[in-house]
Amino acid sequence: MKLYITPGSPYARMVRIVIIEKKLEDRVEIINAKTRHADSPYYRINPSGRVPYLIRDDGVALEESSLICAWLDHLDGNLLFDLPSGELGWEARRFEALARSTTDGLAVWIRELVRPRAERSPTLLEHEDERCRRMAAMWELMIEHPLMKGSLNLAQIMLACGLGLETRNLDMQWRTGHPKLTHWFDRLASRPSFAKTAPPPAAFTHSH
Ligand SMILES: N[C@@H](CCC(=O)N[C@@H](CS)C(=O)NCC(=O)O)C(=O)O
């Protein structure tokens, strides 16, 4: 199989972590795609131009990190990330949706910061900064929930991939005033699958 990624994408990182946790590294070739470039050859492979993008051995291609993670998890019939049944299953879905919502904002923010300074919207940057502060305060209250502390799940992976953008976005200050979230993140970040997939640091900032 082939997985198209960019090294900084939190969504692609989520799939890469699942691949490592599932011990599928020998079965998936990881390929860097050139995204957000006019006439990129990648557009002939994936018309949407987005990553992650998995081309299965049968040639069928999948977009969307949640779909790709679920498909990979089902591959060997030995589910690592299956949802619990009943109320806990809905809680797991709720947490995963909140983690994805958090990451969606952080991804929009870094995307804006990567633009040339004159093309950036100060309104958007301010909006995402404020959203990030609110979401970090929310997670500080929720991070000791059994779902976030128990065995690894997709909500934990998604949230950590979002917060991990801190090494690229120097304006992002989710740690400040959030000791529980900081402790949670640092513990997860030392796990081999997270350490191996950490985004390359960059020094994007708007404030200085
Ligand atoms: N909902 C998608 C989001 C994927 C996404 O936004 N990928 C970004 C990188 S973080 C991308 O490929 N952007 C390139 C573009 O928009 O052209 C998922 O979960 O896979």
Image (cartoon, rainbow, N blue to C red):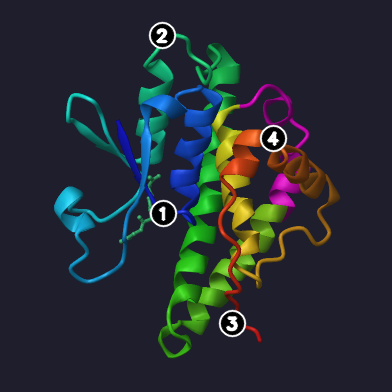
* Residue 150 within the magenta-colored segment of the rendering: yes
Residue 165 lies, in percent from the top left, at 59, 58
Residue 104 lies, in percent from the top left, at 48, 54
Q: Are marks 1 and 4 in contact (CB under 8 Å)?
A: no
Residue 106 lies, in percent from the top left, at 54, 60
The residue pinned by badge 3 equals 206
Q: Are marks 1 and 2 in contact (CB under 8 Å)?
A: no
* Amino acid bearing label 3: His
* Amino acid bearing label 4: Arg
Left or right: where does residue 40 sit relative to residue 202? left
The residue pinned by badge 2 equals 77
Give the CA separation, mark 4 to mark 2. 24 Å
* Amino acid bearing label 2: Gly
Q: Is mark 1 within 8 Å of ligand 1?
A: yes
Which image quarter is the C terminus in?
bottom right
Which residues are drawn in magenta?
137-152
Q: Are marks 4 and 2 in contact (CB under 8 Å)?
A: no
Q: Earlier in the sequence, mark 4 or mark 2?
A: 2
Viewer-nearest residue: 23 or 162: 23
* Residue 9 within the magenta-colored segment of the rendering: no
Q: Residue at x 54, y 31 (%)?
A: 154
